[in-house]
Image (spheres, rainbow, N blue to C red):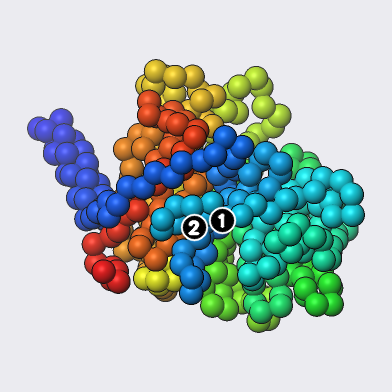
């Protein structure tokens, strides 16, 4: 009798879990699949893409690792518009480019190594450079990519550097004494580091990666840590933390704990078996948020090596959040269906790259996306 009761309890618990996941499952529609050919001299950095809508149409800007350059394409029809050269020497040099942001019809910001923000014209002429120096954490590079794009409040630029220079030696008790977010007045070139860091209990269960992604909605910056269910809400106007919002995925349950220096490929295998959050995007057309995540896997269940799987995680999902960051539902894509870090929001819907290098139909000569839509959201057509 006791064994029967245990079986019934386990069956009901499993049923309850499955019902919860089904109830939380989003209904999606592939509105359109698009495939854009690339010229032979274009090798895109697929984690550094910007969608732009203007009176003259929709555009896609991509950092080209060849050159290096920033390439601008018109989306409909797909056509190469222009290249912006990024000089590596001479009076217009920008160091090692590590992401960009187009801010007007003839103004491009480059994040670089060493840590500087360069303003260029579309002719590649450098207008100004601003050093960003952190005297405590000793930042040695800046980035503005899909994960951490430059954010703006008129002439104020916000950037982030979510790392500890000496991660293993950082005392958990001091984790909230570091600043990882800076703001720059583009007119006066004054830089300030905001007194905002990880919560004091962030490492209570062990050391986890401090990296995060972010996006914004009007005055609010929304920070999405890779290894914490809580989102941070930050006011641009006063540069202060407003509070936290718990948005736990039913699929994200096990974060990787780092106990010391990695031994061989042990860290890769453990990372692959762990869950974590990925990009955070705001959709201004539907006024919702997308929080992407990785689901941990056992690499031995696949026919490829763990390094290939780690470089292009097989199981990717997303959470759909309303404007108040309440969870509307979740969706998990089929294995290897989409390419990590390569998504953007457009007028027609959410673009997710389907050119994952672990797919049989991968082709480096194309950009390929599914434009997906979600039941319950309003679209123009």
Question: In terms of secondary structure, where does tag 1 sit?
Answer: strand
Q: Quadrant of residue 267?
A: top right
Q: Are marks 2 and 1 in contact (CB under 8 Å)?
A: yes
The residue tagged 2 is: 74
- Which residue shows up at 41% across the image and 55% down it? 77
Can you give x and y, in whole percent of width and height, for residue 194 in the image?
74, 69
Q: Quadrant of residue 199?
A: bottom right
Question: In terms of secondary structure, where does tag 2 sit?
Answer: strand
- Label number found at residue 298: none
Mark 2 to mark 1 CA distance (whole Å): 7 Å
Q: Is residue 231 above or below residue 296?
A: below
Front residue of 208/372: it is: 372
Q: Can residue 195 be seen here?
A: no
Does label 2 or label 1 sit earlier along the sequence? 2
Q: Is residue 252 above or below residue 309?
A: below
- Which residue shows up at 54% across the image and 32% down it? 311
Q: In the figure, is residue 5 to the left or right of 223?
A: left
Front residue of 301/262: it is: 301
Q: In the figure, is residue 336 to the left or right of 17?
A: right
> On the rendered image, what quadrant is the C terminus found in?
bottom left
- Label number found at residue 81: 1
Say few, some or many: other residues with alpha carbon within 10 Å of mark 1 (under 14 / 14 to 19 / 20 or more).
few
């Amino acid at each position: 009798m006791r064994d029967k009761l245990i079986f019934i309890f386990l069956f009901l618990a499993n049923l309850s879990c499955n019902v919860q996941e089904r109830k939380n499952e989003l209904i999606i529609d592939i509105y359109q699949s698009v495939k854009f050919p690339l010229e032979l001299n274009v090798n895109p950095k697929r984690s550094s893409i910007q969608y732009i809508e203007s009176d003259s149409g929709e555009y896609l800007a991509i950092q080209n690792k060849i050159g290096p350059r920033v390439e601008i394409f018109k989306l409909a029809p797909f056509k190469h518009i222009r290249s912006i050269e990024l000089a590596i020497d001479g009076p217009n040099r920008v160091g090692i480019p590590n992401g960009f942001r187009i801010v007007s019809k003839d103004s491009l910001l480059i994040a670089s190594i060493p840590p500087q923000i360069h303003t260029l014209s579309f002719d590649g002429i450098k207008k100004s450079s601003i050093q960003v120096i952190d005297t405590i954490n000793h930042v040695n590079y800046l980035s503005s990519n899909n994960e951490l794009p430059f954010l703006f409040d008129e002439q104020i630029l916000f950037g982030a550097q979510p790392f500890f220079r000496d991660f293993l030696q950082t005392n958990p008790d001091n984790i909230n004494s570091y600043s990882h977010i800076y703001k720059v007045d583009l007119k006066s070139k004054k830089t300030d580091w905001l007194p905002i860091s990880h919560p004091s209990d962030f490492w209570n269960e062990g050391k986890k990666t401090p990296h995060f992604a972010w996006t914004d909605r009007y005055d609010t910056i929304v920070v999405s840590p890779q290894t914490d269910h809580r989102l941070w809400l930050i006011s641009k106007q006063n540069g202060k933390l407003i509070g936290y919002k718990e948005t736990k995925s039913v699929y994200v349950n096990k974060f990787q704990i780092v106990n010391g220096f990695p031994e061989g490929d042990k860290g890769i295998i453990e990372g692959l078996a762990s869950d974590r959050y990925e990009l955070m995007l705001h959709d201004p057309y539907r006024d919702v948020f997308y929080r992407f995540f990785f689901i941990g896997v056992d690499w031995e269940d696949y026919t490829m090596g763990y390094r290939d799987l780690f470089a292009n995680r097989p199981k990717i999902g997303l959470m759909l959040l309303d404007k108040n960051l309440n969870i509307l539902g979740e969706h998990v894509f089929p294995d290897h269906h989409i390419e990590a870090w390569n998504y953007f929001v457009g007028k027609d819907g959410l673009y997710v790259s389907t050119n994952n290098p672990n797919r049989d139909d991968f082709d480096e000569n194309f950009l390929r996306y599914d434009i997906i839509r979600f039941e319950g959201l309003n679209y123009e057509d």
